[in-house]
Image (tube, rainbow, N blue to C red):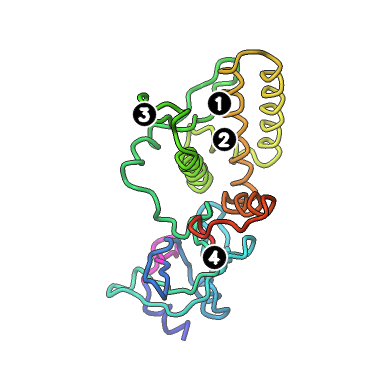
Amino acid sequence: MSEALIHHLKFDEEGLIPAIVQDDRTNEVLMLAYMNAESLGKTMQTGETWFWSRSRKALWHKGETSGHTQRVADIRLDCDGDALIVRVRPNGPACHTGARTCFFRASDTLVEEAQAEPDVRAGEAAAEPAPPELKRPNAQVSLVDMPAMELGILLQDLFTLIQERKDQRPEGSYTSYLFNQGLDKILKKLGEETAETIIAAKNEEKKELAAEITDLLYHLLVLMAEREVSLHDILVELSRRAGRPADPKYGQK
């Protein structure tokens, strides 16, 4: 079966084919990933989705670390044989952010994210520009009046941007620089930001402390992305400690 299917497919010059993952029950589009002949073969052999990571140049089994596997119900190819639809029964959220689907962002957020490229921080090397700030709300809206949900959306958007930097590694991005340097560099920066937050907390300048906490949060999110810990994982743990289950609308099935 797999050999017959692979024979009818048109892989690109890198031996890859886009695979649209769709919920077999709801028809909701969950994610877009890429397969090569080997990952497609493993998908059909195991009954769970396997893909090819273009950034890591390696096979990856969806849900291997998170447990959010996808049981394959059907695989369909388009009329040209250069794209696949993989219909699945998901065991939890599809997105690394904890969202049920990767397609949860409105198009009007893309302009703001594109403008989130960092500047060079004074006192640091030019090759290590400052991290992007959390996107600011409308200047007419007070942070005091902003609902907690809005702050959560800002964190979600930032974490999504960080994950995109991890996957795509664009040049000139501080986030790409951290991922390229690896875990030890990320931990070093996290330690530095922790120390700076402690120092700022000893002073009376509230604005400075808020800025340092923001930098610390950013580097924590980078660490989470590096170690494949999602915001959903944090929500589940916080809910457990609060003695109540996580709200299912935040990605829990």
Sequence-earlier tag: 1 or 2: 1
Q: Earlier in the sequence, mark 3 or mark 2?
A: 3
Task: Tell which tag, 1 or 3, sits nearer the viewer.
Answer: 3
Could you say whether the residue bearing mark 2 is in a helix, strand or loop? helix
Tell me the CA gap for discs 1 and 4: 39 Å
Please, which residue is most extreme toward the top here? Answer: 204
Which residue is denoted by mark 4 in the rendering? 92
205 or 15, which lies in front?
205
Q: Say whether marks 1 and 4 touch (CB < 8 Å).
A: no
Numbered tag placed on residue 138 in the rendering: 3
Q: Is mark 1 on a helix, strand or loop?
A: loop
Precedes in sequence: disc 4 or disc 2: 4
Report how far apart the C-alphas of labels 4 and 2 lie in the structure.
31 Å
Sequence-wise, the earlier of marks 1 and 4 is 4
User: Label 1 sits on what residue type?
Assistant: Ala
Q: Nearer the viewer, mark 1 or mark 4?
A: 4
Whether pointer 1 and pointer 3 mark residues with C-beta atoms closer than 8 Å, the reply is no
* Residue matched to label 2: 177
Real-space Cα distance between discs 1 and 2? 8 Å
Earlier along the polypeptide chain: callout 3 or callout 4? 4
Q: From which residue to which does the magenta span run?
A: 10-20
**Quick one: SS at disc 4?**
loop
**Residue topped by disc 1:** 127
Q: Which amino acid does label 2 sit on?
A: Tyr
Crowding at label 3, few (<14), some or many (≥20) Cα neighbours within 10 Å?
few
Q: Residues within 10 Å of mark 4 (few under 14, many from 20)?
A: some
Picture quarter containing residue 177?
A: top right
- The x, y position of residue 166, in whole percent, is 53, 45
- Residue at the image position 48 percent from the left and 23 percent from the top: 119
Task: Give the image location of residue 171, x and y in percent.
Answer: 48, 36
**Left or right placement of residue 184 versus residue 30 in this view:** right
